[in-house]
Image: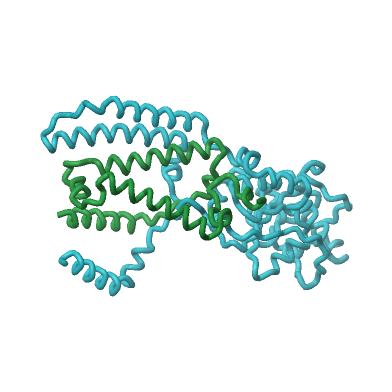
Amino acid sequence: MEHLFVSFPGPFPIQAMYGKIGFYTVTLLIGFGFGYMLEIGGFAKSEKLAAQFYLTDMTVFKVMFSAIVVAMVLVFGAAALGGLDYNRVFVNETYLWPGIVGGLIMGVGFVIGGY
Amino acid sequence: MFFVGGLSVGIFIFSNTVDRISDFWNSSYMGRYTLMDWLHLPTGVIVAGIVILAMFLFWGAEVVENAVNGTKPDKSKTKYKLIGAASISVLALIVAFIGQPTPLERYQKFFPDKAEQLANREVQIEPPELLSYIANDHVRTVMLDVRDEADYNLFHIKDAKNVSIDELPQLSKELMKMPANTLFVVMSNDEARATEAWKILVGESVDNVYILEGGINNWLATYNIVNEEERLKGTAIAFAPPEPIATAATGTDTLRYEFPAALGDQYPAAEPNPEEYEFEFTPKVKLKTKQPAGGG
């Protein structure tokens, strides 16, 4: 049992805590939940994604930014209260210009793919 | 069909040209770079700022949406939107108000086991153990000398880096990126300041940080061996009367030795030949392999 508490506070080492099967179960559940939410939000329709760029439907923007804001407040709230070790939270590394160019390519692809 | 065709052509073009763009692809690398690093503002201010920005942008998005579609604003859900906006704003303000823990607070809150190890003197390594790791090619040893620059210039162990305590929180981000087999050793004249530095690094979640037991004074007591000729000419570091190892509690954290000149790492004691000494010490270093960052 002792190893369960070694890295408290979070992020929790799911694989060390519950083993491989547990790790897959947790990731599968989160992935399924995420996909389900996108699906019922209508995000599986390319028209909806493209509509964002024609400024006729701002749902994508609102959902994504809401998710960012909620996650941000919860992450830093947990860190402030001592429940999360922010230094160990994965932050994707920044490659500034490649990131900008890649984002543009993906955005253009969204619009074209959505007709 | 058209879509799949495009996809295949795209994959083909990409895979055949990726080598040519890889320079650009890997360019402008900034590592773990966050808004806090960019704007140099406290985390709480950023959190509150982003939330306010979000509210403003949500409102703006709906204005744009209605303008483009030529529709009238839908007032039926205004109440829920306001409730949502108010609750997230209040939470953001609470986060900003509490503030993020400082390294020392994090050390006290998150690492009670480390405090125990410190008290049991499990993290203070003897000079021979440090020397054995300097000589060990399988382990990268990073020595952080947290004394004043003046003391550092008088004498320091070869390859030790002079850093001030204030720089440590920023430096810890670099240290965390180093390979898992990296050993960090902090040192001061005795142990007091090194212990402060150790607490900050531990609080910043850096693994494998140890303190040089008895600090530079103890290192010199162990390795400052000069011959009679040098001693009489006054070109060697003076002997200090033997004293028990000064801990953080007992030491004054001042340099007990006298130096003929500020030669830094040019003294023999700065770089003792590992082959000339026997490694007699109680091993304390337990290298911990890296726990991957979670929550990606």
Horizontal and vertical percent for residue B292? 53, 57
Horizontal and vertical percent for residue B161? 63, 56
Does residue B59 appear left or right of residue B32 in this picture?
left
Q: Nearer the viewer, residue B134 or B18?
A: B18
Residue B287 visible? The answer is yes
Query: Which chain is the one coloured green?
Result: A
Horizontal and vertical percent for residue A55? 18, 42
Query: Which chain is the one coloured cyan?
Result: B
Horizontal and vertical percent for residue B71? 12, 32
Q: Residue at x 51, y 59 (%)?
A: A21
Tally of marks = 0
Residue furthest to the bottom in view is: B16
Does residue A113 appear left or right of residue B23 in this picture?
left
Residue B168 visible? The answer is no
Q: Quadrant of the N terminus of chain B?
A: bottom left
Q: Quadrant of residue B271?
A: bottom right
Does residue B48 appear left or right of residue B156 in this picture?
left
Q: Is residue A28 above or below residue B74?
A: below
Q: Residue at x 80, y 71 (%)?
A: B276
Q: Nearer the viewer, residue B157 or B183?
A: B183
Q: Residue at x 16, y 34 (%)?
A: B66
